[in-house]
Amino acid sequence: MITARRMWRRVTSAAIAGTVGALLLGALTPVAASPPSVDAYVQRNDHPMGSQIARVEGDRSDRESKAAARRPQGLNSDGGQAAATVAGIDVSGWQKNVDWNHWWNQGKRFAYVKATESTTYKNPYFAQQYNGSYNVGMIRGAYHFALPDRSSGAAQANYFVDNGGGWSGDGKTLPGALDMEYNPYGATCYGKSKAGMAAWIRDFHDTYHRRTGRWPVIYTSTSWWNQCVGTAQSFGSTVPLWVARYSSSVGTLPSGWSFHTFWQYTSSPIDQNTFNGAYDRLRVLATG
């Protein structure tokens, strides 16, 4: 099956028109086709979570590594020893209208849905994905793909909250996630020093907390984080870590964290994740 991420890497601006509708995850989206203009908007502007990590670091996941990811690893979000995991997925505009009953029947119990990117892109499928995952029974959250060279952390946090990235203490809404990964348009660290990147993230982090009362989750890979942020500032005391590594173990964590909360372990046939703890701990994270 062609994944959204692999499709994203293959599509070029010259090949967008006319080819994508037949290729994009038909098995995942058995709903009426969307207007070509909507699909073109997604293809031009939507960078799925982990798309740039897979591009740079590769995806070496296989059947054995996926099985390993479902076993408890390290500490859960409360800092205690994890005794279980919870399976989930993340989606973006590339998945279009998602068949949430299918993924519920596959055992997925939480989902993160892309809401925004920079201060210029809003996922046109957000309502179907965010509400659909909730309605089928999943605990859901929203995420924002950061472009730190385009505007301030505060501006992007506000744009995120204003366009689906908020939080409510209903026990089924996870705190919003900040997607920090390789620059899809240029320099790996967006032209920022480690101190400058840490300050940008702190600006987003503090603004999101002021707006919602919650600290954001941070999604990243160890390689990107250590190159672009390193030890310039630690977020481990406030921020749940969502680490991306497409292999049989989480491996070394980014600087500043001693345990992970989420692990994105593969992009096939869709981005798949585990929560590092039992279902009741996931509810605690959602409740605040």
Image (spheres, rainbow, N blue to C red):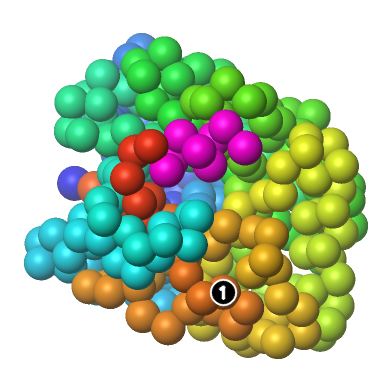
Type of the residue with mark 1: Trp
Q: Quadrant of residue 38?
A: top right
Q: Residues within 10 Å of mark 1 (few under 14, many from 20)?
A: some
* Residue 50 placement (x, y as % from top left): 47, 60
Residue 172: x, y in percent? 50, 26
Say which of 188 and 199 sits in front.
Answer: 199
Q: Main secondary structure of the magenta part?
A: helix
Residue 286 lies in the magenta-colored region: yes
In this orientation, does residue 172 appear? yes
Residue 52 pos. (x, y %): 51, 66
Query: In the picture provided, is 19 more to the left or to the right than 172?
Result: left
Q: Nearer the viewer, residue 167 or 16?
A: 167
Kind of element beneath mark 1 = loop
User: Residue shown at 54%/62% (left/top)?
Assistant: 241
Q: Which residue is mark 1?
A: 257
- Locate residue 218 relative to residue 74 in the image: left or right: right
Magenta-highlighted residues: 281-288
Give left or right: position of 162 versus 138. Answer: right
Where residue 66 sits, quadrant-wise, is bottom left
Above or below, 199 against 32 in this view is below
* Vertical comparison of 234 with 215: above or below: below
